[in-house]
Structures are given as C-alpha cells and as structure tokens.
Image (cartoon, helix red, strand yellow):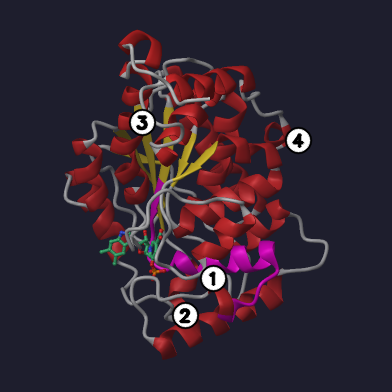
Amino acid sequence: MLLDWLNAPCHAIDHATAAAARAHQDQLTKPRGSLGRLEEMAIRLAGMQGTATPSPDPVRILQFVSDHGVAAEGVSCFPREVTVQMLHNIAQGGAAVSVMAKAIDAVMEIFDLGIAVDPGPVVGVRSERLGAGTGNIAHEAAMTEEQLAAALTIGRTAVERAVAEGARLLICGEMGIGNTTPATALACALLDLEPTLLTGPGTGLDAPGIAHKAQVIASALQRHVEATSTPLELLRRLGGFDIAASAGAFIRAAQLGLPILVDGFIISAAALVAVRIQPNVRDWMLFAHGSAEPGHRHMMAALNADPYLHLQMRLGEATGGATLVPLLRLACVVHQQMATFETAGVSSAAG
Ligand SMILES: Cc1cc2ncn([C@H]3O[C@H](COP(=O)(O)O)[C@@H](O)[C@H]3O)c2cc1C
Ligand SMILES: O=C(O)c1cccnc1
C-alpha cells in the first residue's frame, strides 16, 4: 500500500558507541556528571550517529507552512491571511526562524503545503500545495486519504534529500494560523485527555477565547474520535498538512538514522503521532524546549521527554530547535576536545 513505508523498521541506535561516549565523559577532567545534560547531549548524538565524534552539523530545518480550515471558528488571535504573509516574511529573512537559521548556519527548506491564498512562485519556497488549507475539523476531516499520504510523503522525501546532502540533525518547524487547535485536538485524542486540560492561548487568546477554543476542540473530538481510531486516522481527521509532513519526516529520519530535534507545541503533536505510529522513532528524538503552551507538558510526559530549555517560548517555526543548536555544538566540542585525567596528569577521584 501507499503508506507501507511507515512500517519499515527504524535504524538501530549504536548502544556500544553511546556506552563508550559515556565512559569517555567520565574520563574527562571534571567531576563525573558535572557538565550535567551537556554530557547527555553528546552521548545521545554519539549513539545515534554511531561515532565518537558526534556533531549536529550540518543542521537541516524543514519549515512547513499551511492553512487550517478550523481557523474559521475564531480559534486564533490572528487572521488567516497572516499565514501567507509570514510565508513571504520567512522567505525574505524577516521571521524569527529566518534570522536564527542564518545565525546558526542551518540550511532551511521552506514548503508551501497549502495556504488559503495561493502565493504563486516565491523565491526560496517549494510549492507542494495539497489544497487551499485543510478541512475545518469542527465539521469535517482535515484531510482526505490522498492528502494525508501526500503530506507524509513530502516529509519523507525532504528527509531523504537532507540525508543525501549530508544533514546530521533534523529540525521541523511550522507556520499556519490556527494550528495550535489541531495540535491540541490530536494530543487530546492520542492521550485521552480533556480539551479543557490541554487547550491554551496559542497566539494569545484570553480566558473566554480559550474556553471557546476548547469547545471547538471538544466538538471535533466528538465528531472524529472512535475507540478503534488508529493514530494515522486521527492524524488524517484532526491534524494538518504541517503536522502530517513533520510526522512523515520524523518516521523517515528514524528509519535513515538521522537525529531529530523536536521543536514546540505543534511539532510535538507531530512527534507524538509519529511515535504512536512507530514507537522506536522515540529513540531518535531530542527535545529542545518546553513550550509555554500549557498542554505541552502533557505531551512531554506522554513521550517520557524532559526538554532541555525552559525559556517561555511559544512561537513554533522551529525557533526552539534552532535555539538549542549552539548548546549541542558546545556539548560536542567539549566531548571531543577536553583532556582526560590521564593525558592532563590530573588526579582522578579518590577511591
Ligand atoms: C505573526 C506570527 C508569526 C508566527 N510564527 C509562528 N506562529 C505560530 O502561531 C500560530 C499558532 O497559533 P494559533 O493557533 O493561536 O493561531 C502558528 O502559525 C504558529 O506557527 C506565528 C503567529 C503569528 C501571528
Ligand atoms: O510552542 C509552539 O510551538 C507554539 C505555541 C503557541 C503558538 N504557536 C506555536
């Protein structure tokens, strides 16, 4: 079948190399464990990349831009046309992620997956339009089966391209007005939690706005969720082109052995659905930051994830992922360049 590739096995983590990296950390001239989670970053990357000299570089960012039919329900502070406006802004270098990608020297591929207004050809943007946005999940499925398969495949193909070009770390980002709503709906369905628990302000809704958004999500759940729903079917009914493309990218990255750095709230919903489709994808994920969106911690708990940064970020666009990259680099340089107790002639711990 068209989506059989989703079930292909994930690449194996190199546990021996990870164990050697841990042993190496313990020989460096510092009290054991004193560089805290910087040590873990290097060890995890060593196990994923199968090398004693791990590195996040080259970093590849996939930026998925698309509209969401549910924006018609008044679930965002911003009007829908911001999606296409931000597509131009991202491509022209003015968006937060554009500045960050340049500053950290990451290659960013920008995708138009289906925006309500067709922007036509835009320099630096791959046009992979799957429609004029998704269906409004309050009333209909977000995607047809064909659209879901196509979105997953766009993510898959982008990762194959990235790997062929030498990428060693994947970050997915998204931009699409209203997309905290499908992300929340998907999380509620996959975690079996109430919308009132997971629904947050997104771009900045007030308390009545959040209550309305939770109601919209509740009606979407009532319409689409059945006891027998598979994760893939929940993704089709409740997700978005951006979320599906990211899920496809994550599954392919794990299959090809490309480490994944998970961004904020929306991308975490994609990570969650990818892991529910194929549990071993989790082994390939690092988690950049805790989003200020309140439902995020529930997704992190379900993924058994403890994000590295807590900066009250709530933007998406891969900005949380980009923010962690300098720390990953530092962790890897320390891992490679520090002296050991033996080479430096420093006495190790007594006993
Ligand atoms: C100017 C602007 C730039 C953004 N970049 C990311 N988002 C983020 O906010 C949106 C999700 O929030 P909600 O569900 O409340 O609409 C998405 O586009 C997400 O990427 C932005 C939002 C705005 C307004
Ligand atoms: O954490 C995120 O990714 C996020 C939160 C709110 C709005 N947009 C994105």
Name the residue tied to disc 3.
Answer: 331
Eye-nearest disc, 2 or 3: 3
Q: Residue at x 39, y 10 (%)?
A: 342
Where does the magenta region start and end? 173-196
114 left or right, relative to 85? right
**N-terminal label among 2 and 3:** 2
Task: Give, as a three-letter code, the residue at label 1.
Answer: Asn
**Residue 45: image location, x then y, percent:** 48, 28
**N-terminal label among 1 and 2:** 2
Name the residue tied to disc 1.
Answer: 136
**N-terminal label among 3 and 4:** 4
Name the residue tied to disc 2.
Answer: 73
Q: Looking at this view, is 302 or 135 the one in front?
A: 302
Residue 193 in magenta?
A: yes
Q: Are marks 3 and 4 in contact (CB under 8 Å)?
A: no
Between the C-alphas of marks 4 and 2, the distance is 35 Å
**N-terminal label among 3 and 1:** 1
Eye-nearest disc, 3 or 4: 3
Task: Give, as a three-letter code, the residue at label 3.
Answer: Ala
Task: Give, as a three-letter code, the residue at label 4.
Answer: Met
Task: Give, as a three-letter code, the residue at label 2.
Answer: Glu
**N-terminal label among 4 and 1:** 4
Name the residue tied to disc 4.
Answer: 1
Q: Are marks 3 and 1 in contact (CB under 8 Å)?
A: no
- Crowding near the residue tagged with mark 1, few <14, some 14–19, many ≥20 C-alpha atoms within 10 Å: many
Relative height, residue 13 to residue 263 (above, below) = above
